[in-house]
Image (cartoon, rainbow, N blue to C red):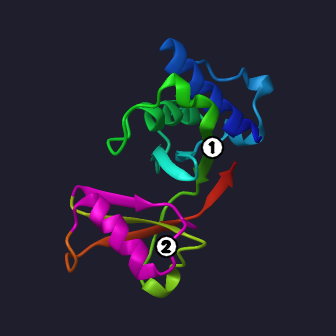
Amino acid sequence: MHPLVRLAKRAIEEYVKHGRVIEPPPPEEMTPEMKQEAGVFVSIKKNGQLRGCMGTFLPLCRNVAEEVIRNAITAATEDPRFPPITEDELDELEISVDVLSPPEPVSDLSQLDPKKYGVIVESGWRRGLLLPDLEGVDTVQQQLAIAMAKAGISPGEPVKIYRFTVNRYK
């Protein structure tokens, strides 16, 4: 298990069992990935099905370690699609951590590839994000439609599109 995933797992377990937010490792124990600043998504699956996913596309914390702790807890307890994770589920969870590259604007749909790039769609204050390489998302059109639906953006509305890559840790 990658150290970022181990950190996310520990953060979820400590919060669900005891209501406590763990501290990040001391700098001398951090991996290089933990020290950088980046957006991070934490995805939680149970029996192969999504159970929670939350994150930030731009960094809100001082480093990835803090971002992982924050987003692991919100994925476990605040994803509006699911009830909070309970202590009896902890042994059944599969956790992955995606560290995002900075988003870059897309001027043409040919610059997108749902297996390689995640997307952010934006219309006014509404913004939707979809991670790359998701099961069942095989076309750019599917990827954009899902991201727009997540943001409450209707088909045909003008949108700004950004792409990003991820380093996915399991």
Q: Is residue 28 above or below residue 132?
A: above
For the N terminus, which image quadrant?
A: top right
Q: In the drawing, does residue 162 fall left or right of residue 111? A: left
Q: In the drawing, does residue 99 fall left or right of residue 119? A: right
Instruction: Work out whether mark 1 precedes mark 2 in sequence or the reverse, and give the earlier one.
Output: 1
Q: Evaluate whether residue 65 shows in this view.
A: no
Q: Amino acid at mark 1?
A: Glu
User: Dot 2 lies on which element?
Assistant: loop
Front-lying residue, 93 or 88: 88
Q: Residues within 10 Å of mark 1 (few under 14, many from 20)?
A: some
- Distance from label 1 to label 2 (Cα)? 20 Å
User: Dot 1 lies on which element?
Assistant: strand
Residue at point 61%, 50% (across, down):
99
Where residue 22 sits in the image (x, y, percent)?
59, 18
Q: Evaluate whether residue 100 shows in this view.
A: yes
Residue at point 59%, 73% (across, down):
115
Where residue 49 sits in the image (x, y, percent)?
51, 52
Viewer-nearest of labels 1 and 2?
1
Front-lying residue, 108 or 85: 85
Instruction: Name the residue tied to disc 2.
Output: 137
Front-lying residue, 69 or 49: 49
Q: Residues within 10 Å of mark 2 (few under 14, many from 20)?
A: some
Q: Is residue 104 above or below residue 167?
A: below
User: Is residue 26 one of those drawn in magenta?
Assistant: no
Residue at point 80%, 24% (across, down):
28
Q: How many marks?
A: 2
Instruction: Provide the residue span drawn in magenta.
Output: 125-153
Q: Is residue 87 above or below residue 44?
A: above
Instruction: Name the residue tied to disc 1.
Output: 94
